[in-house]
Amino acid sequence: MSKIKTYLEKGNNIYLILIVTFIGSVLLRIGLGLLCGQMNVFYDELLHWNLSKSVYYHLGSNFRNDILSYKEILYSIVLSVSHAFGDGQTQYHVAVAMNSVLMSSVVFPVYFMSNRFLNNRFRSFLIAVISIMVPEMYYTTKILQENLYYPMVIWFFFIFIMLILKNPYKLRNVILMSSYIFLVSLCKQMALNIFTGVVLYYILQFLFFDKENRKKCLISLLFFITVFLGLKFTYDILFNLINHISKESSAETTIIAILQNMFDTYLLSRLMYPLLSYLLLTTLYFGYFTVTLPISMSSVLDKKERNLFIVTCTILLSTIMVICLRIIPAENLDQVMARFHFRYMFYLVVPLLITLFSIYDKVKLVKFDLKIIILSVVYLMLLGYISIMPAEGSTIDCVGANYIKYLFNSEMMVNTFHMLVILWIAGSIYLLYRKKVKAFYGVVAATLLLSGVISNIYTYIYIYNDKQNSVNKNSDALTLNKYFEDQKDFDWRSLLFVSDKNVSDAKLETFFERPDYYYSKTDDFKKYIKDFPGESFWNLNLYSFNHLFHDPKVGYPEYILTNKWYSIEGYTQSELKLKRYYLYVRDEDGAN
């Protein structure tokens, strides 16, 4: 270990190691993505992928031939480059490579902001390695916003550490931070939690932590809010004008629902359990001591340590509140086992680790405090009241939970897990008590690294087996793409796709060449052709990503693609050989 430290401290060796680490991570993730990954096992992937096609083909925010009021399309804009390469399969491989580069790139900002904060190359490099080993890095195999959102949030903390901590009330820095958070919000709605977290941070500074500079703090807060909201409203107006949208956006719908739920006192009482569950589980997944040790040593934190920890906690609390107010009521309300959306907050492990390592010397010098024991006793008592087995769906939302569910999937093993947590916390506290600080930090870092490695290994094996066992529906899509390409003057708007609205058939849709086809559910279509045989489909229920609509332009579509066989008046089944689907072509006699 000492040789590694010496090597890192010498000259420019650290830069060479960072580059090698980055390249190694990119190549490994590309290889694992191509070997194990498959297009779409999660419905949101269809949204981001189809929007990227719309961007590439200059169709606005077109999804199933409907203009969505979905404005967080920055990731789709980035992905749109992949559609310039080959067929759908090749495009997906290019997207995996882009994801791998994006996610692996965090090693650079993490190292440099850590080194600015800690002034220690070895510890900074260790944090950088952990940042690309967290279980959620497996998202590089998926078409999910986290691939861009993670590095963008890390750059937010880079700005906060490099500029705000140095000069917190310099308006140029505040405006830059606010503008950048606006940019992050174009990637993912959850970025609004970062905005809210920073607002709470300034409020806490004003009320408790920086009373000497209250005027500057208030001015900075007003500038921060004004710049962000000004950019946000301007963008929203331009987006609506360009795309001719008059309906509420998905973000606006979410905010309205949250505000309504905040005043539902009965609902709030039912959200206490999931709120506590999220606080306990996130603390555990972050490595426990990354949260509890800075809290127990709050009296000896210097200003920059305290401020970084505060903004991290305010963002965390804002995110948990949004999950509880918006997602839990729709998914797991009144259920002991909650779907754990760790992917909305896993990036916070980086600033938490920076804070933890910054107090390394203080832990050695400060007298052992009983606060950490009290916190741990309370924590372990509360942990016994919640379910540590997350609900179905956490496979994608919390990769580490996938491994835990596999390993501890019985009452006996759940008790075993509780015992291991108790032993790990107790053993670590003993190391703190005996002033074996180096060993303590080694245990925490090793635990996070091992959890990342083991969870990733298990998850890649899991999705590889799923890929081998799944029906390869993309071949039908590629066949259809080639067929439609050969049809003279073919327009994708002349295609009506009929299927059950589920993830399985989304695997077909992701490989369609373009996104501007129509989509209807099986039950609606079946009833329509029974009630109105041979008539126009102008009043058929059509479905976009998140709502039902009608379009008189549908009329008599030239092609109808279904996942079940039908007798459709005015249409003849095509002789095109498909494995799982049926293609119907409008009869020439009925085309008049």
Image (cartoon, rainbow, N blue to C red):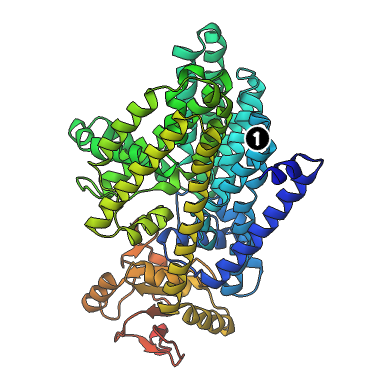
Above or below, comparing residue 131 to residue 196 in the picture: below
Q: Residues within 10 Å of mark 1 (few under 14, many from 20)?
A: many
The residue most toward the right is: 11
The residue most toward the front is: 434
Above or below, comparing residue 433 to residue 501 in the picture: above
Q: Nearer the viewer, residue 542 or 399?
A: 399
Residue at 46 percent of width and 90 percent of height: 576
Q: Is residue 592 visible?
A: no
Amino acid type shown at disc 1: Met
Residue at 61 percent of width and 39 percent of height: 155
Instruction: Quarter of the image for the N terminus: give it.
Output: top right
Q: Could you say whether the residue bearing mark 1 is in a helix, strand or loop?
A: helix
Q: Position of residue 86 (x, y in %)?
A: 64, 74
Q: Position of residue 548 (x, y in %)?
A: 33, 58
Residue at 34 percent of width and 72 percent of height: 537
Q: Is residue 405 visible?
A: yes
Q: Nearer the viewer, residue 210 or 380?
A: 380
Instruction: Quarter of the image for the C terminus: give it.
Output: bottom left
Residue at 26 percent of width and 47 percent of height: 387
Q: Is residue 425 left or right of residue 61?
A: left
- Residue underneath mark 1: 113
Above or below, comparing residue 355 to residue 223 in the picture: below
